């Protein structure tokens, strides 16, 4: 039984008053913070739509992408976001770096801070690595770009933004996440973000691909997970998709089968693939999201992946705007005097983004 | 026998009226387009010669280099070209990217388009990959940076530019390409470009390193290759170089010997190496080009490689200017309204490059 | 016995009058040049402390980092330095480059020069590679970012700067370098730099990790090493650290044990680790430097590494400022007419850095 620990101190660091320095997951995001990110993303999306899609906002700021795992879309998205805000972006990947010389993560990130890096975007195979970094950095912000099976908050925020853009609001939407919940950092961060924004979330997976707390229902009693009390769980994909507003199949890591968690890929796709027939069970015009990269023909049929309801490319596009917003809110934020930041009424857009 | 298909539609997309979106090979380049690239390269070369060699032309544009094969010179050349035009350049290589996760080329390039990339420079081991990309992109331009054995148009254009710079004109020049024609994308693109610009091209190689259509002469009858009708083929390097204006030895991939296409490297260099003795057979002051990287002592002797007639470093220098021109013509081009572009008289420099 | 060769020509190229084109090691640096680097670093440090830490000094200049060995801190430091001066920085590493195709270093660097690169920062496993490059480049400057066991001048300069910042002057300081002197390019460059700046240097290592000339004392007679005549050597770390002003343990490459140069790592750290007990033998407030990355628990104890006397993170911070200074002095320098450069009185800051 979990011992209750206070998770929300009196003044929780947050984006609205400019006191948040890191974005590690969405479990400590208030609805006001999510709304601030959404509104700031609107402004950034406007920049992205311009003929000259570049603003001087982060000129003279240094952003490091520190990737200990392969990635195209997340790294490119952050790199582009930083550059379009005129930051200098420096890429460090585990191959070709001191990591190969066995340098500790602590010394690597303190070295990066010492060079003057304003923000590090980190992807790491170990859950919690970005938290360790954040605890050991005084002047450099951290954005979790994916840590192990744990969290991927910028991906969840771009999912939220894409839903909000199409439905006007996330609140009240039935969102179904189908697939390998157990190993999905995207699912975890979306759970926090979607419930904070008022969505009704249904998780659907075979029992071998669900975390224990969702199998035995203990998440409903865990005070640390009080935000997730309304989440539903089912093994049946037709039941899950019934009347859904949003359907989000997850990438199936093909090595899960070797680990004995699946009978065969064919069996999995027969039971859980989001295909046209199943998508018809959802509300008309239901939205299809996928965090990518897709295994077409496994967790999603090519017809759905490239069909009229698929927002997969819009997600990527919104991803750049969301990351511009996050970089802006964490890095430009640090400049203003704290007293001014306090004047900004909670939930309203601070004046500082007007000049974009 | 090849079935004749119309290769030139009524209005073929072209750089002159701003309707071309991709540069995949030179087989569909008109002499006017080649001349436009040459003239634009002149302007870019002037920028490269300045003390501050940078212009704001492509500010706020995003160029991605997507390299599925190792490269220094082509990637560096395009990266530098983009940056000197003030574009943001993002490098993606197959190692360290989603490619390792098995993402399809289709989804990779649609993802890059969705991030807002204005142009992708791609190098790919499979011939035709850039064509596949171009067919699946609506808003992002593609430049083929080398695909399998097929084409490398920017390399051929820099060869053309280098010849033109030294001779005033390409028309009428005898250009000899010596070596592994069979596996050379550089040779293929040069064939189209050189013949379109009016050069007389001689191919020289051992029979095992020549494409079948040049061995059996069928290229002369193939309506798809009508531009190549005047190309000559010989196995004898002395005969080939006789009175040549330009001599271009090709890199010999050392693995060709293992594949049984060559007796020994020593035999090859004895029979086909461009050395000082053979170069004397050419016209006085004949130009020596090489696409690099060189195997000195194999296809070219060190004396010729670094001799007074060698333009190998000028080729590299011109390569940056040519690529600046290509990026400019494809990306800056997209801004102007199409109706205005139509006003530009064919073969004349459009006003839009004046401001450089 | 070494044959005496003149190492200082009549007019030795130097930074003070703007005639130096390369920074390969500190053995040919005059005290005036070191002082110029220190003073220019002061100016760059001021830039780094600004809210917008970017100046247009090197706009339109191209800097290539050419790394044939893995590195984080040196590559990131130079990349950041270049970008904060508004240069375009292009990274080339041995993996994913033509190096894999077997291109010679000569052709690689001449290719980079031909693209218009103003400066190449090179790291190479072979001692002397940067000298070979410098001899073969007419228009491109070279900074040695570490060559084999030989030299790492920018690291030594940041060490000098860090000492000077804390003590006001380097002259007269007792600086102890402890550890694998034999394989350390950092130690070698520091030896030249520290002695030129007037420090008293003590080398401390087990005999198997000392170069022969320091074991047999022949460095005192070697006319090429006349600057090192006052250097002392000891095998005893307590004796070495006694009354030291600066203690610099070196990274122990763990593979040295396999090579039979060490009994065990445990034995080494027992005999030579800089720990709190030994540090107490130094002068009160003695400075601890380490070139990084550290093997904590081997050559340095964690308490010392992260203790109050450790300047390891300041070294990294100063490293960016020093590299900005070096890039500035080599690249911006080339613009002014040589005659003007001659007017600058030796040892005084030239006017050209005032505008920063």
Image (cartoon, coloured by chain):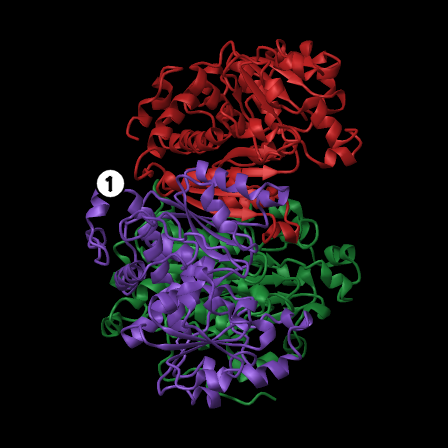
Chain colours: A purple, B green, C red
| In-image side of B52 versus B297 (left or right) | left
Relative height, residue B218 to residue B33 (above, below): below
| In-image side of A306 versus C227 (left or right) | left
Relative height, residue A334 to residue B175 (above, below): above
Q: On the image, which quarter does residue C72 sit in?
A: top right
Residue B14 % position (x, y): 37, 73
Residue A249 % position (x, y): 49, 76
The residue depicted at 40 percent of the width and 59 percent of the height is A26
Q: Quadrant of the C terminus of chain A?
A: bottom left
Relative height, residue B152 to residue C155 (above, below): below
The residue depicted at 66 percent of the width and 36 percent of the height is C126
Relative height, residue A117 to residue A231 (above, below): above
Count residues near mark 1 (Cα–Cα under 10 Å), then give few for <14, some for 14-19, many for 20+.
few
Nearer-the-camera pick, B312 or A2: A2
| In-image side of C249 versus B189 (left or right) | right
Nearer-the-camera pick, B323 or B122: B122
Q: Which residue is mark 1?
A: A337
Q: Chain of mark 1?
A: A
Q: Quadrant of the N terminus of chain A?
A: bottom right
> Which element carries disc 1, helix, strand or loop?
loop
């Amino acid at each position: 039984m979990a011992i209750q620990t206070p998770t929300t101190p009196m003044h929780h660091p947050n984006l609205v008053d400019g006191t948040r320095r890191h974005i590690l997951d969405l479990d400590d995001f208030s609805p006001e913070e999510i709304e601030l990110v959404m509104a700031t993303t609107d402004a950034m999306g406007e920049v992205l739509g311009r003929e000259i899609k570049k603003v001087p906002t982060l000129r003279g700021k240094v952003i490091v992408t520190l990737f200990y795992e392969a990635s195209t879309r997340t790294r490119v998205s952050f790199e582009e976001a930083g550059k379009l805000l005129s930051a200098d972006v420096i890429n460090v990947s585990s191959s070709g770096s001191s990591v190969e010389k066995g340098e500790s993560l602590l010394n690597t990130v303190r070295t990066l801070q010492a060079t003057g890096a304003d923000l590090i975007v980190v992807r790491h195979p170990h859950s919690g690595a970005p938290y360790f970094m954040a605890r050991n950095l005084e002047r450099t912000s951290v954005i979790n770009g994916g840590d192990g099976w744990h969290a991927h908050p910028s991906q969840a925020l771009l999912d939220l933004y894409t839903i909000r853009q199409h439905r006007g609001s996330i609140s009240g939407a039935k969102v179904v996440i189908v697939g390998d919940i157990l190993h999905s950092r995207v699912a975890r961060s979306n759970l926090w973000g979607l419930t904070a924004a008022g969505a009704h979330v249904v998780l659907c997976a075979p029992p071998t691909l669900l975390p224990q707390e969702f199998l035995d229902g203990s998440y409903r009693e865990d005070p640390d997970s009080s935000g997730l009390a309304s989440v539903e769980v089912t093994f049946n994909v037709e039941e899950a998709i019934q009347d859904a507003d949003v359907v989000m199949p997850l990438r199936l890591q093909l090595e899960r089968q070797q680990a004995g968690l699946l009978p065969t890929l064919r069996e999995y796709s027969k039971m859980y693939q989001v295909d046209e027939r199943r998508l018809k069970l959802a509300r008309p015009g239901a939205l299809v999201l996928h965090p990518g990269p897709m295994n077409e023909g496994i967790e999603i049929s090519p017809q759905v992946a490239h069909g009229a309801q698929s927002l997969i490319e819009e997600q990527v596009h919104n991803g750049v705007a969301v990351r511009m917003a996050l970089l802006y809110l964490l890095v430009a934020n640090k400049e203003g005097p704290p007293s001014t930041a306090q004047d900004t009424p909670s939930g309203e857009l601070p004046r500082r983004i007007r000049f974009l």
